[in-house]
Image (tube, rainbow, N blue to C red):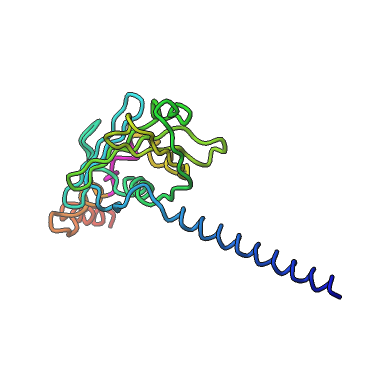
Amino acid sequence: MKLQRSTGILLGVAIALAAAVALFETQKDTTESSDTLYSFAETDVSAFTIEQDDSTLAFEKADDIWQMTEPETAAADPSTIAFLLNIVTTSAIQDTITASPDELDTYGLDTPNATVQLTVDDADYTLTVGDEDFSGSSLYVMTIDSDTDIVPSEVHIIANEFTNGIDRPLDDWILDDSENAEDESTNDENGNPNSEITEDENTNDDSED
């Protein structure tokens, strides 16, 4: 009888420990997932550049309207920009690794695949993008501070959707205003139907009659 009671007590203790460990791990995962690369929001960014290989894309925002300034001057596609900046500002840090400058090549960060420079108010922030992890689902990145090349660096692991935000053809970054141009061609400066087109249509109708 005493043996059964002891077994029951031990079983209860084991269950309690397992529950405590599960609760701890859940809280730990929640805490880690709440950490992001930056504390500012997507809408706080007023300019940014993306450098990859020998190419540079540059954008500036004025009155909440984005403009491409490099490699050409053009109206920028706001949805493409919002997609990238949302990833930069909201992606959860999955893990952080402390690495010395000599170890950065392990993560592809000694010569980054891409560098993103962000301007918020009067401050500049640099994000370097390294290699994918072994699974291909995550990416090694690093936020650069002024002393990064002197002190050990923090290498962050984030979801690999960041690659989809920067690896785009040039046309994706430029606003396609063909629809607006078509609308403007059929309307006058006040937004009313173009009288010349209306007259031409009426002429064609009369000739058919």
Q: Residue at x 43, y 41 (%)?
A: 156
Residue 2 higher or lower than 81, as above or below: below
Q: Which portion, as a residue range, is magenta?
A: 171-179
In the rendered image, residue 98, in percent from the top left (x then y), is placed at 44, 38
Q: Residue furthest bottom?
A: 1
Q: Nearer the viewer, residue 184 or 29?
A: 29
Q: Does the segment drawn in magenta span residue 107?
A: no
Q: Residue at x 45, y 37 (%)?
A: 140
Residue 30 higher or lower than 53, as above or below: below
Q: Nearer the viewer, residue 91 or 184?
A: 91
Pick the quarter of the image with the C terminus. Answer: bottom left
Q: Residue furthest front?
A: 2
In the rendered image, residue 170, in percent from the top left (x then y), is placed at 33, 34
Q: Residue at x 74, y 70 (%)?
A: 9
Splitting the image into 4 quarters, where does residue 161 fall? top left
Side of 195 relative to 206 (left or right): left
Side of 5 relative to 92 (left or right): right
